[in-house]
Amino acid sequence: VNTLLLGNNHLVSFPDLSQLLPTLKTLGLVSNIFPCCWKSAWLKDIAVLFVDDFPCHSSSTLVGIAWSHITKFQLESTNCTGEFLSNT
C-alpha cells in the first residue's frame, strides 16, 4: 500500500500504520481530528500527508497549533490522552 485516503470518514480510531513505512507515501486524513502525541509522531514521516490545518483534538499544548508548525520531536515528547490512534 503506498496511498491510503481516509479523509471525510469521521474516524474514531485507526491502527498504527507506521509498519507500512516507508512503503506508505501518501495518507489522507482531511476532516479527521486526532490526538497530537507520541502515538501520532509517525505521521510526520509520511511523504505526502493531507490533514486539516489544525487537526489536534488533544494534547492541550498542541491544540490550536497548525500541523505544519508541530515538529515530530514535539509529538514524541507529548503524552497521549485521546483514543483515536490505537495501541503502540
Image (cartoon, rainbow, N blue to C red):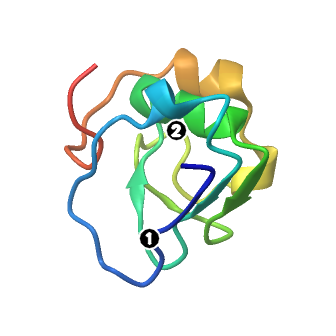
Answer with the quarter of the image where residue 17 lies.
top left
- Can residue 5 be seen here? The reply is yes
Residue 2 x, y percent position in the rendering:
63, 50
Residue 6 x, y percent position in the rendering:
44, 70
Residue 3 x, y percent position in the rendering:
61, 59
Give the residue furthest to the bottom.
8
Residue bearing the label numbered 1: 6
Total numbered labels placed on residues in the image: 2
Disc 2 marks a residue whose amino acid type is Thr
Residue bearing the label numbered 2: 61
Disc 1 marks a residue whose amino acid type is Leu
10 Å crowding of disc 2: few (<14), some (14-19), many (20+): few
Q: Residue at x 22, y 54 (%)?
A: 13
Residue 38 falls left or right of residue 52 = left
Q: Residue at x 59, y 60 (%)?
A: 64
> Are dots 2 and 1 in contact, CB under 8 Å?
no
For marks 2 and 1 on the same chain, the one whose residue lies earlier in the sequence: 1
10 Å crowding of disc 1: few (<14), some (14-19), many (20+): some
Q: Secondary structure at mark 2?
A: loop
Q: Residue at x 62, y 66 (%)?
A: 51
Distance from the alpha carbon under mark 2 to that under mark 1: 26 Å
- Quarter of the C terminus within the rendering: top left
